Amino acid sequence: MKKLITLFIISCSLHAQQSEGQSIELPDFVITGVQSISIPEMEKQKPDLIQSLSEEFFTPHFLPHELNLKDYSTPNGIDYNIFRQLEYNTGTLILGAGNNTLPAGHLYFNQNYNQFLLNTHLWGSNTTEYIKNAGYNESGLSASADIFTNSSSSFLPGLKINFNGLYFRDNYKLYASSDPGYKRQKEGYKSEISISSLVSDRIKYGMDGSYEGIKFRDTNFKEEVIKAGGFAKLNFGKFGVEVKGGYQKQHLRNTFLPLRDYDYIFTNADLLFGFIDIMNFKIGAFYSKLGNTEFFSPTASVDIKIDEGILLFAEYDPRTEFFNVNDILNDNRYFEPLFRNNVLKKVESHIMLALKYDYSELIEISVGADYKQVDNQPYYNDSVNKGIFNIITLNDIEHLRFFSHLIIHKNRFGYLIADIYYNDIEDKNDKTVPYVPDLEISAAYNFIPFGRIEFIPALFYVGRQYIDAANTINLSPYIDLSLTAKYQMFSGFKIWIELNNILNRSNFLFNGYQEKTFDIIAGIDYRW
């Protein structure tokens, strides 16, 4: 309750900033935080009646973000490709090697045939044993094809059809377990098709379906997942309707649990209102079902344009979140799926308030807070088998979070992006939920002091996090300071060097599993 009172005080202070007597229209679009890029001009489309605003609206997509279980991202680093202008290359070859990485490579091939676009990506990397048994090896191949119809076509104008496929494999050792030499070998695959049409002012729709799976070669555990989903939005001027939903079927083989088939469905329906020039309002309901567990809740959101470039947003959005084995392994590769098949997290209440400021497409600042009451909150635990993580769930969780995001777009001083989260998440006994840090900071600055030289210093920080429910043991703060430098030798060809964990700290995200020590990687970037 004290967290909810705190959020209420924040809402009052944000609301007090609203100017009276405003009669200005909402902007045609609001920058979402993804780096602006130069593209050929197209005819301007009429804006949606209601902007689809959610936490992602205030969060740069390329920054670490709240993930499935730990509520923070693993430190793969910020994607520095966001700093580049859009480049239309037929192919890209990136190769690198270093003291802890030998080798690493990416090969991209892209081809455009009128209204057909083909993309392929082949990759592989090998992390050597920076400490005993701590290496990691991965490789994969992905391909996608997009088919478009012209927006002025008499038959299904603006239709986009996408086919894509993926295969990957990796292997690594559970080096913090009682058998540190045990090697886990995993492979996965995915095929997907999607159809969408977003160009019409009156109706937008889409649907998709996929088949994906993972397999452990060392234990023969296998998960197969079939997914289907869709959405439709109808715009009648000052009024609209939006419906979306999805279905997921999970099938497991060679697991120790008797139930091996799960069916999860969800749907979200909303009525959209835009009768006032400076305000949009959305009201609806969310429903989901997993086996005999049903969930229903009303939902609502409102966004108000306070002044030019200033937007206030509020949302009430309870829902469920279903995580299959592959979702969990993407968050923690040391998870053991033989004893836990999935997690259904129930967000019984969720209130979010945020304020965003844009200035002349130069700077974006957003601040806010959200409060959640959660049942079946998952956390990782390796108390039974050291270094092999199971999932335990808790009820009656209160989670209050404050967040802020800063983006300074490209100018003569460079680019800057920064993201800060503060978490206060406790159970009914006032104990902090394990593996949720109290503070998270990500920041990266890109600048080009000379025409051919580019520098990108970056910081990733994860504060204190407990590893047990009793809060008796905690991990030291995770600090990764890095620097990337690039030099363009001639058109399409760059050499680069990247320094990771410059402070050479012993960083841990999971108990016993130390991340890479100081690492120097150098290589080439060739585009044609």
Image (spheres, helix red, strand yellow):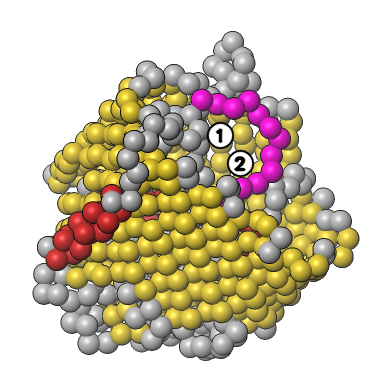
Q: Is residue 472 found inside the magenta-colored segment of the image?
A: no
User: Mark 2–mark 1 contact, CB under 8 Å?
Assistant: yes
Amino acid type, label 2? Ser
Q: Is residue 325 visible to the viewer in this orientation of the structure?
A: no
Q: Is residue 43 found inside the magenta-colored segment of the image?
A: yes
Q: Given the current orientation, which residue lies at the most extreme front position? A: 21
**Looking at the image, which is closer to me, 379 or 25?**
25
Left or right: where does residue 197 sit relative to residue 106?
Answer: left
Q: Is residue 363 visible to the viewer in this orientation of the structure?
A: yes
Amino acid type, label 1? Asn
Using the image, determine if residue 20 lies above or below residue 149. below
Q: Residues within 10 Å of mark 1 (few under 14, many from 20)?
A: some
Left or right: where does residue 442 sit relative to residue 100?
Answer: left
Q: Give the Cα separation between the discs numbered 2 and 1.
A: 7 Å
Q: Where residue 31 appears, x then y in whole percent?
A: 51, 45
Q: Which residue is mark 1?
A: 162
Q: Which mark is residue 144?
A: 2
Q: Main secondary structure of the magenta part?
A: loop
Using the image, determine if residue 17 lies above or below residue 334. above
**Looking at the image, which is closer to me, 491 or 521?**
491
Which residues fall within the magenta stretch? 35-46
Q: Where residue 510 appears, x then y in whole percent?
A: 38, 78
Q: For the point 30% across and 34% down, which residue is it?
A: 281
Q: Residues within 10 Å of mark 2 (few under 14, many from 20)?
A: some
Q: Quadrant of residue 203?
A: top left
Q: Which mark is residue 259?
A: none
Q: For the point 60% across and 84% down, which residue is it?
A: 502
Using the image, determine if residue 491 lies above or below residue 489. above
Q: Earlier in the sequence, mark 2 or mark 1?
A: 2
Locate the N terminus and report the quarter of the image it occupies.
bottom left
